């Protein structure tokens, strides 16, 4: 099996974590890394950080050099060649239709698809009073609409605050993506049949404040 890993040409925590998890199970020669340009975004004011700072990480090219993994910076996804059994998304923007077409590209979305699509999935999940989990899925030409492989629920506890829940939810995302082959072989989806909703944009501060107010009610509904 040959796997193409797609990430940023920039330090990225999720990339570091998943690659190191892969290397505990698979030989380095299974992988090649393709690194897309990273566009520095303006810092947004938020009330709750839903994932750790991603830039506080080892650059993927450093990991690649240490483990002798082929590392190729590219200017766009159309430079990434065909021929891999799977492509795993560790970090990227929206991929082009030309690249996506005809490939098995796997992503892990931090929400339950197709009910919670788009950005800030954890926050929109709570605001909309929906169950929480992550979705391993294939990418197609639309946002968060490809074939679902598995959905894995994130445990919620009565003692959680938003910070502990966000940490556990992020860890669930890393775990599921790191173990994609097991979920391919033994798919699970306790939430099949949910209606598809339009993709969300970033949550505005005014709605984030309301989400925080709704958290206790949401937690009482979904805690174990």
Image (tube, grey):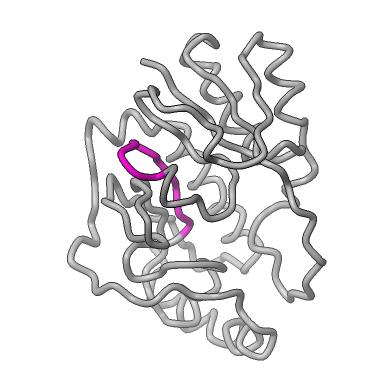
Residue at 56%, 68% (x, y): give it. 120
Q: How many marks?
A: 0
Work out whether 69 lies above or below 118. above
Q: Is residue 104 magenta?
A: yes
Extent of the magenta region: 100-110
The residue lying toward the viewer, choosing from 141 and 174, is 141
**Who is closer to the viewer here, 220 or 82?**
82
Q: Position of residue 27 (x, y in %)?
A: 50, 9
Quadrant holding the N terminus: top left
Name the residue rendered at 61%, 54% in the picture.
Answer: 167
Q: Quadrant of the C terminus?
A: bottom left
Residue 103: quadrant of the picture:
top left
Residue 23 among those drawn in magenta: no
Relative height, residue 5 to residue 56 (above, below): above
Q: In the displayed structure, does residue 66 sit left or right of residue 179?
A: right
**Residue 22 percent location from the top left of the image:** 51, 23
Please state the horizontal and vertical placement of residue 41, each as a whole percent of the image. Answer: 77, 61
**Residue visible at 61% across and 38% down?**
7
Question: Is residue 170 toward the left or the right of residue 54 in the image?
Answer: left
Q: Position of residue 181 (x, y in %)?
A: 34, 28
Q: Is residue 41 left or right of residue 67?
A: right
Q: Between residue 49 and residue 162, name the one nearer to us.
A: 49
Residue extending farthest to the left is 193
Name which residue lies at 81% across and 67% down: 43
């Amino acid at each position: 099996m040959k796997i193409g890993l797609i990430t940023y040409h920039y330090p990225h925590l999720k990339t570091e974590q998943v690659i190191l998890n892969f290397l505990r199970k698979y030989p380095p020669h299974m992988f090649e890394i393709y690194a897309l340009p990273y566009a520095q975004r303006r810092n947004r004011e938020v009330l709750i950080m839903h994932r750790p700072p991603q830039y506080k990480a080892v650059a993927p090219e450093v990991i690649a050099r240490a483990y002798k993994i082929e590392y190729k910076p590219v200017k766009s996804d159309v430079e990434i060649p065909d021929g891999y059994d799977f492509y795993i998304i560790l970090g990227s923007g929206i991929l082009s239709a030309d690249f996506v077409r005809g490939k098995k590209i796997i992503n892990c979305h931090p929400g339950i698809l197709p009910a919670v699509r788009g950005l800030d999935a954890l926050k929109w999940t709570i605001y909309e009073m929906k169950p929480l989990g992550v979705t391993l899925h294939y990418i197609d030409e639309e946002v968060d609409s490809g074939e679902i492989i598995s959905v894995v629920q994130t445990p919620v506890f009565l003692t959680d605050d938003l910070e502990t829940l966000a940490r556990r939810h992020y860890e669930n995302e890393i775990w599921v993506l790191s173990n994609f082959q097991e979920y391919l072989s033994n798919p699970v989806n306790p939430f099949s049949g949910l209606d598809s909703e339009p993709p969300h944009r970033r949550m505005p501060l005014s709605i984030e404040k309301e989400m925080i107010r709704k958290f206790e009610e949401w937690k009482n509904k979904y805690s174990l």
